[in-house]
Image (tube, helix red, strand yellow):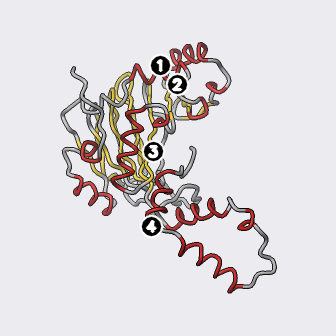
Amino acid sequence: MTIPPPIASLAGLVAPLSTDAFRALLEAHRPHLAQTGDPARHAGLIDWDTAMAGLSDGTFEPGDIRLYRNRRKVPSLFVKVPPPARAELVRQMQGEDAGFIVNRVERRVPAIASLCAALAGETGDNVTAGLVATCGAGSALDLHFDPYDLVVLQLDGAKRWEVFADPVDHPFEGMNVFPSAPPTEKVLTADLGPGDWLFVPAGYHHRCDTIGARSLHLSLMFYPLSLPRIADLLKRELLVDPADRASLRRAGEAEIKRALIGRIEAMSLDDLLRRHRDLPVADG
């Protein structure tokens, strides 16, 4: 199989869909499946052997790695053991119903870093990536929803995905409002093979199961700019200058409002979008 150059743009990511059609999906908040028929289209980003080597040799930061057995998180032994012992742990877990999640994988894989940067530049979103490797039956995570729009690229093996109706409305990182009962009506059920991709908007409950012995997929997380995110960015800025951190015990309502309005009016949209793209939403 000839390995194509890594995907490096929004157009390359969402083909055969057009970028305009994908932006319409973002706005409509509607799940979408693309079965491309091209098993090599994502191969230039990362493959199974490279991912397993990265887990074993210290390429990936131990603190970014999450381990799962039978959908349950287990202590991250990677933090405590040297790379040679990690290699044995990875080998053992490949023989079990186990999973590895690597957060912020773009920090360590140049092709994925370039793709995330291009997507951020084209959409204005904060875009980060996670790598999900599963072995045996099941998956790493059980039914859940995410606070970001998700594009899944299937890299190796296959997974069966279920996406459910009645999404949580505009979730945000750290928000602790959850539905009273998990949804039961499905809006999408699909088997993803290498080269396929799936769009799951923020708030939609979903789960997936490995088909066969193993699966590797890349999750691209799109965090849009929002009022809570702007408040987060403003807070970060206000923490820099000691004068901004001073007590307001003696300040009146008008004085406090003037100070906040002044800060907001001093923001330019270009600078706000730059900081939104560049500063992490969460360190996962």
Rounded to the nearest angstrom, the CA distance separating label 1 from label 3 is 21 Å
Q: Which residue is mark 4?
A: 269
Label 1 sits on a secondary structure element that is helix
Q: Earlier in the sequence, mark 3 or mark 2?
A: 2
What residue lies at 24% left-to-right and 44% top-to-bottom? 34
Q: Earlier in the sequence, mark 4 or mark 1?
A: 1
Rounded to the nearest angstrom, the CA distance separating label 4 from label 1 is 42 Å
Q: Which residue is mark 2?
A: 59
Label 4 sits on a secondary structure element that is helix
Mark 3 neighbour density, 10 Å: few (under 14) some (14–19) many (20 or more): many
Q: Which residue is mark 3?
A: 128
Label 3 sits on a secondary structure element that is strand
The image position of residue 22, as x and y in percent, is 26, 54
The reply to whether discs 4 and 1 touch (Cβ–Cβ < 8 Å) is: no
Of circles 4 and 3, which is in front? 4
The reply to whether discs 2 and 4 touch (Cβ–Cβ < 8 Å) is: no
Q: Earlier in the sequence, mark 4 or mark 3?
A: 3
Classify the position of the N terminus by image quarter.
Answer: top left
Of circles 4 and 1, which is in front? 4
- Label 1 is placed on what type of residue? Ala
The reply to whether discs 1 and 2 touch (Cβ–Cβ < 8 Å) is: yes
Rounded to the nearest angstrom, the CA distance separating label 3 from label 2 is 17 Å
The image position of residue 184, as x and y in percent, is 40, 53
Q: Earlier in the sequence, mark 1 or mark 2?
A: 1
- Label 4 is placed on what type of residue? Leu
Mark 2 neighbour density, 10 Å: few (under 14) some (14–19) many (20 or more): some
Label 2 sits on a secondary structure element that is loop
Rounded to the nearest angstrom, the CA distance separating label 2 from label 4 is 36 Å
